[in-house]
Image (cartoon, helix red, strand yellow):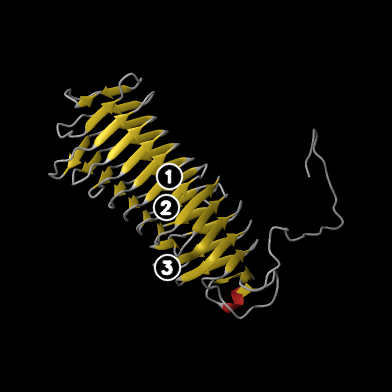
């Protein structure tokens, strides 16, 4: 209903509200909320919309729907395969140190007007476990998802999509070897503390949207792959004590407000810059290894090093016959190769 021109008055004799066709019929492993109650209470769930209690609670195979006007609370560790919070629904952590684990090929979806909230609790974890390809979809722009930590704990992938708002109040962690995260979120993905790449052969792609890391981008595994095609802001260090044989490929915009520090162990770390990269402090190496890390400024790219530390040990490359710009507002003597 809409008004055009002057104000209008409408009198409604009868209103019928129908269930969206997007919701399943129910039955089997599909569970629907029945009001406001705890996740681990059987009275909270039904196998049909508006039905009686199923006498059950969700498990690792459950497809869970939190419906309009319902408010589900997490007091203890919980499991699900899929979690869909529909318009007008809400789910909160209601105790500290509680993990919500999503299993094989899992989905977490927060619709417009819905919320999944840590609610001031400590150590509220959202974990993606098992195998396959997981999806985290947030469409509510008023902080649809607020959680302490998001963790990928197995050799699986997680794709982040939607146009809402995600606030991670602590760390975003890729814990397992071979874990992959693809960020295709078109709004702000905010990490209040660190983005941690903890395993070996870990992949992180920032394909779309604004990734704001209010702490450190930390690499503690070997052979990591990072690709940025949009915007990344790092408030503290981009740091890797064991980042051997890793790569960072930038096609978008990166602003590191502090240092870029990588170890110089048995294998080097390589950055290929095709876009814009600004470092407000030092570009340097840590440790006593003999292998120099490499920063390659590619055709048409822009690199600004605001403070050139005397500890700068990287090799800086700009390809011959290709246009690139290197700016340093600190001391001279950069190891510049063509």
* Nearest the eye: 84 or 122: 84
Which one is earlier in the sequence, the residue at label 3 or at label 1? 3
| Residue holding disc 2 | 180
In this view, which residue lies farthest toward the left? 288
Which one is earlier in the sequence, the residue at label 1 or at label 2? 2
Q: CA distance from mark 3 to mark 1?
A: 28 Å
* Nearest the eye: 164 or 174: 174
Q: Position of residue 86 (x, y in %)?
A: 62, 58
SS state under label 3:
strand
Does residue 259 lie above or below 12 as drawn? above
Residue drawn at x 65%, y 78% as measured from the top left: 53
Question: Is residue 19 visible to the viewer in this orientation of the structure?
Answer: yes
| Quadrant the C terminus occupies | top left
| Residue holding disc 3 | 98
Tell me the number on the disc at residue 205: 1
Within the image, what quadrant is residue 108 found in?
A: bottom right
Question: Is residue 122 visible to the viewer in this orientation of the structure?
Answer: no
Q: Are marks 1 and 2 in contact (CB under 8 Å)?
A: yes
Query: Crowding at label 2, few (<14), some or many (≥20) Cα neighbours within 10 Å?
Result: many
* Nearest the eye: 104 or 151: 104
Q: Between label 3 and label 2, give the one nearer the viewer.
A: 2
């Amino acid at each position: 209903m809409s008004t055009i021109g002057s104000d209008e008055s409408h009198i409604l004799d009868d209103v019928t509200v129908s269930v969206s066709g997007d919701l399943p019929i129910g039955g089997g492993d599909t569970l629907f909320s029945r009001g406001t109650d705890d996740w681990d209470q059987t009275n909270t769930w039904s196998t049909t919309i508006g039905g009686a209690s199923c006498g059950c609670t969700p498990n690792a195979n459950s497809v869970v729907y939190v419906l309009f006007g319902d408010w589900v609370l997490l007091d203890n560790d919980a499991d699900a395969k899929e979690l869909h919070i529909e318009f007008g629904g809400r789910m909160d952590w209601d105790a500290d140190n509680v993990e919500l684990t999503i299993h094989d090929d899992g989905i977490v979806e927060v619709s417009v007007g819905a919320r999944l909230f840590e609610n001031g609790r400590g150590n509220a974890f959202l974990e993606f476990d098992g195998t396959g390809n997981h999806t985290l979809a947030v469409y509510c722009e008023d902080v649809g998802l607020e959680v302490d930590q998001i963790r990928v704990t197995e050799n699986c992938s997680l794709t982040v999509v939607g146009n809402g708002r995600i606030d991670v109040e602590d760390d975003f962690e890729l814990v397992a070897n071979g874990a992959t995260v693809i960020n295709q979120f078109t709004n702000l993905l905010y990490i209040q503390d660190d983005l941690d790449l903890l395993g070996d052969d870990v992949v992180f792609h920032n394909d779309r949207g604004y990734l704001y890391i209010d702490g450190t981008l930390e690499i503690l595994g070997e052979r990591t792959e990072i690709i940025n095609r949009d915007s990344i802001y790092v408030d503290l260090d981009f740091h890797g004590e064991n980042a051997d044989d890793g790569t960072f490929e930038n096609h978008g915009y990166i602003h590191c407000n502090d240092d870029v520090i990588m170890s110089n162990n048995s294998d080097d770390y390589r950055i290929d810059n095709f876009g814009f990269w600004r470092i407000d402090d030092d570009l340097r190496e840590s440790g006593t290894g003999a292998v120099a890390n490499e920063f390659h400024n590619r055709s048409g790219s822009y690199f600004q090093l605001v403070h050139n530390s005397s500890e700068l040990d990287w090799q800086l490359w700009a390809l011959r016959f290709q246009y690139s710009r290197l700016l340093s507002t600190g001391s001279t003597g950069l190891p510049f190769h063509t």
